[in-house]
Image: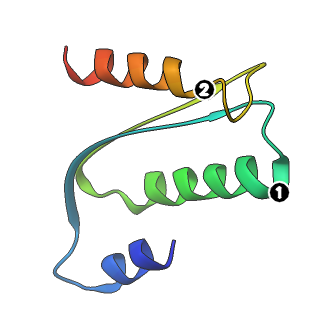
């Protein structure tokens, strides 16, 4: 969050030409994973960076060790279209 905040505060950095696929398991602990990730996704979405393609998904019923395979497959599928 600090790195992104510093980037955003620089007036020269209003674009962010990247594809980002972020995910989290819905069974993750609220204060340690879900809340910070949701906050970061909300922040990025509100920044209105030109060129940012942000996709966020919560995998319900999955925990920390369960989400990596569907995240990998869905992320690759999304960006290799």
Question: Is disc 1 placed on a helix, strand or loop?
Answer: helix
Please tell me which residue is depicted at 56% across the width and 58% down the height of the picture. 40
| Side of 42 where 28 appears, left or right | right
* Residue at which label 2 appears: 67
Could you tell me residue 30's position as x and y percent? 83, 48
* Residue at which label 1 appears: 31
Mark 2, Cα crowd under 10 Å, few <14 / some 14-19 / many 20+, is some
| Discs 1/2, front | 2
Mark 1, Cα crowd under 10 Å, few <14 / some 14-19 / many 20+, is few
Q: Nearer the viewer, residue 32 or 10?
A: 32
Can you name the residue that lies furthest to the front here? Answer: 65
Which of the 4 quarters of the picture holds residue 72? top left
What distance separates the C-alpha of mark 1 from that of mark 2? Answer: 18 Å
Q: How many marks?
A: 2
Could you tell me residue 46's position as x and y percent? 47, 57
Please tell me which residue is depicted at 51% across the width and 17% down the height of the picture. 70
Up the image or down, 16 lies above or below 72; here it is below
Question: Is disc 2 placed on a helix, strand or loop?
Answer: loop
Up the image or down, 65 lies above or below 40; here it is above
């Amino acid at each position: 969050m600090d790195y992104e905040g510093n980037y955003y505060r620089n007036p020269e950095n209003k674009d962010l030409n990247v594809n980002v696929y972020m995910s989290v398991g819905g069974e993750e602990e609220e204060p340690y994973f879900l809340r910070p990730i949701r906050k970061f996704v909300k922040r990025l979405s509100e920044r209105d960076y030109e060129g940012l393609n942000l996709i966020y998904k919560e995998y319900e019923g999955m925990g920390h060790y369960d989400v990596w395979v569907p995240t990998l497959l869905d992320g690759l599928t999304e960006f290799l279209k």
